[in-house]
Image (cartoon, rainbow, N blue to C red):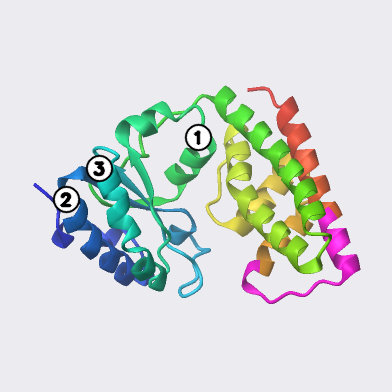
Amino acid sequence: MAANVNDLQLDAIGAALRDGVTAFCEKILPALGDNLRSITVVGSSVTEDFKPGLSDINSVLVLGRQDLASLNTLASLVRSMGRKRISPPLLMTESYIERSRDVFGVEFLDFQLSHRTVLGDDPFAALTFDKKDVRLQCERELKAILIRLRQGYIASAASKTLVRDILISTAKGLEPLLRAILWLKDVERPAGAEHTFSSAADKLSIKMDAVIAAGQWRHRKVRLSEAEMESSFEMIYSTIDQLAEAVDKLEV
């Protein structure tokens, strides 16, 4: 039997999210029918970093089966979701989640830390991970960021605006990696960005000031001088290089 809006566990999420999540669910519940197993709100949407009207609402839908009909259903809702600042949801099946713990440990650990299931069974609470898999993913991701930074700088023709945007994106993408590294070191993981960076700086003895600053640019109209842009790029690149080296040497 397909679920309906009355089945939603809205007390699991903050008041600022309820209208948007309810409106989204009102559309997808009848459309996806009994193929929908669960709806989980994830990420900064359920942390102190959420800013109503500015932050997007991210979610994971667990389906019984992946099919084109489900994709078409959600594709038809893109505009209405955008008006409610709801990002296109991640679609998964239970078997996909189980078979992907070894390659998406960083992401699933982050979902496990910050999520609220509003319909169905919680897909993340009981997941377990192998530290060797997570360490390898962290190393690979950090070294890939270094490549993207170099390529992005060249492709942008050293444009101050474009490099600033690359650094903002880099800072945001670094958060789940830092939390995964803290998990590898058996350190309690903060959910919010500010505490994540400060905890990582303390536990890893690596300065995070430039990365923290870039993360704060997201909600400000920051204009960098050429000297500021170059200095920020060099410091953030150095920070990630140090992180990659630390993870490379980490024994788990």
Q: Main secondary structure of the magenta part?
A: helix
In the image: residue 181, left or right of residue 32: right
Residues packed near mark 3 inside 10 Å, few (<14), some (14 to 19) or many (20 plus): few
Q: Amino acid at mark 2?
A: Gly
Q: Residue furthest left?
A: 1
Q: Is residue 205 visible?
A: no
Residue 51's place in the image compared with 196, above or below, is: below
The stretch in magenta equals 218-233
* Residue 193 picture location, percent across and down: 60, 57
List the residue tagged with mark 2.
33
List the residue tagged with mark 3.
121
List the residue tagged with mark 1.
104
Question: Is residue 226 shown in magenta?
Answer: yes
Give how far apart the Cα atoms at labels 1 and 3 are: 20 Å
Q: Amino acid at mark 1?
A: Phe
Q: Secondary structure at mark 2?
A: helix
Q: Residue at 69%, 68% (x, y): give it.
A: 217
Q: Amino acid at mark 3?
A: Asp
Q: Residue at 21%, 51% (x, y): give it.
A: 32
Q: Residue at 77%, 61% (x, y): give it.
A: 163
Question: Is residue 128 shown in magenta?
Answer: no
Q: Residue at 52%, 52% (x, y): give it.
A: 191
